[in-house]
Amino acid sequence: MAFQQGLSGLNAASKGLDVIGNNIANSNTVGFKASQAQFADVYANSLLGGGNAVGIGTQVATVAQQFSQGNVTSSNNPLDVAINGSGFFRMSDNGAVTYTRNGQFQLDKDGFLVNSEGMDLTGYPVDSNGLIVPSSPTTLQIPTGDISPQSTSNLKATINLDSRLQQPVTGVFNPADPTSYNNSTSVTLFDTLGNPHLLSMFFVKTANPNEWDTYATVDGTAAANVDFGGGGGVATQLNFSTGGVLTTGMPLTATVDLAQVSTDLGVINGAASPLTFDLDFNGTSQFGSNFGVSSLSQNGYTSGRLSGLAIGQDGVIQGRYSNGQARNIGQIVLANFNNPQGLKPLGNNQWAESPDSGAAAVGAPDSGSLGVLQASAVEDSNVDLTAELVNMITMQRTYQANAQTIKTQDSLLQTLVNLR
């Protein structure tokens, strides 16, 4: 029986060395999870339930995967993503779904996010407004075309007009004559083709207390081409209370005759005309302090080309465009399992769902039990190289000890054979 015991020990130690060797070989494999050979004793039982109390050896009960967290290391690839916490990336290979912890991704020729084996990363898509649609995960594709321009439909200005100022020296407004107005400021508007137009606003103190007239020009053309609601380029007066608070109803409806502006400048512009937008001076004040512009913003922009990508902790992929805009492109999803050790290893850093693992629970990163993502980083193998080398020495001694039991049993049998 000692031969069988020693032989089983040799087989178990050999398989243990195989597992340790595989761990060491993958100590630099991104997203690799170490395995551990787990052993069980073996006893022979009779049909009546009696057994041999000595036992007949050992066997490898299972090779258990260890899904502990690996170190996160920064990389130079902005598309590299590391998972900090639980979960797996969900990959699609022509519809066949697999799971991985290796977040080394790149773009293929069609703009899809893929790994080194060409498998597609999956996630949630976005709607036409850039909102994440948490539906069935689909392959993530980065759009390479330009985004369309958006014409200005809203302009907000928060300004302080100095109540201490007097009427301008020159009584007739002339944008070329600084003595005909008190203050001015400018902002860029965009038409339906994304062409920029410089809107200049001029503020003129009137003879009436707490009242200002507002004039405007576009691209330096005559004020008559711009209407703030008062006609002829003059806005309805901005009226203030004795406490300096704006009392004129907002917003104003502003229109710009782009066709006339284009004619005045001698250029061709096929954008829609007139350009109409809401002009909101809410928050504007008339205090006894210097003129100042607290905020001046509008919602138009020209066309833009993709210039960069950013991936947030929640997996949202945001595109940065040359026109200064940012748009959501999609959201990476993660999958988790009740029993990750039950996943079936496929090689190439991939696992497949199995009956032992349970069904995948898919969701956005940083939700439920799922971890968070870190861009421009990868998760290292969780192999503890020092511990594996020590385990290898221990397993080697185990192998030698089992070989010695076989050698000792052989010596005993030889002694019996030599009896006279």
Image (tube, rainbow, N blue to C red):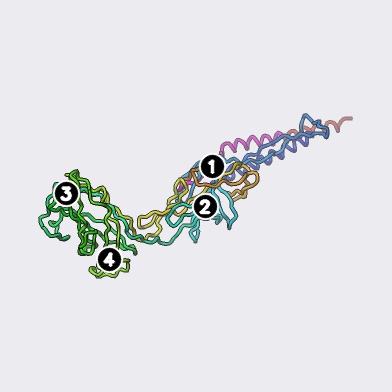
Sequence-wise, which precedes: disc 1 or disc 3?
1
Left or right of 354, for residue 172: left
Sequence-wise, which precedes: disc 3 or disc 4?
3
Instruction: Tell me how far mark 4 sits from mark 1, CA to CA.
Output: 57 Å
Instruction: Tell me how far mark 3 sits from mark 2, CA to CA.
Output: 56 Å
Question: Can residue 135 be seen at all in this image of the molecule?
Answer: yes
Binning the other alpha carbons within 10 Å of mark 2 as few (below 14), some (14 to 19) or many (20 upward) gives few
Under mark 3, the amino acid is Asn
Q: In front: mark 1 or mark 2?
A: 2
Where is residue 317 drawn, in percent x and y? 45, 51
Where is residue 218 drawn, in percent x and y? 24, 62
The secondary structure that dominates the magenta segment is helix
- Mark 3 sits on what residue? 210
Residue occupying image coordinates x 34% and y 58%: 301
Q: Which mark is residue 86?
A: 1
Q: Which mark is residue 111?
A: none
Bounds of the magenta segment? 375-401
Where is residue 192 drawn, in percent x and y? 34, 63
Under mark 1, the amino acid is Ser
Under mark 4, the amino acid is Leu
- Mark 2 sits on what residue? 135
Question: Can residue 29 be seen at all in this image of the molecule?
Answer: no
* Quadrant holding the C terminus: top right
- Mark 4 sits on what residue? 258
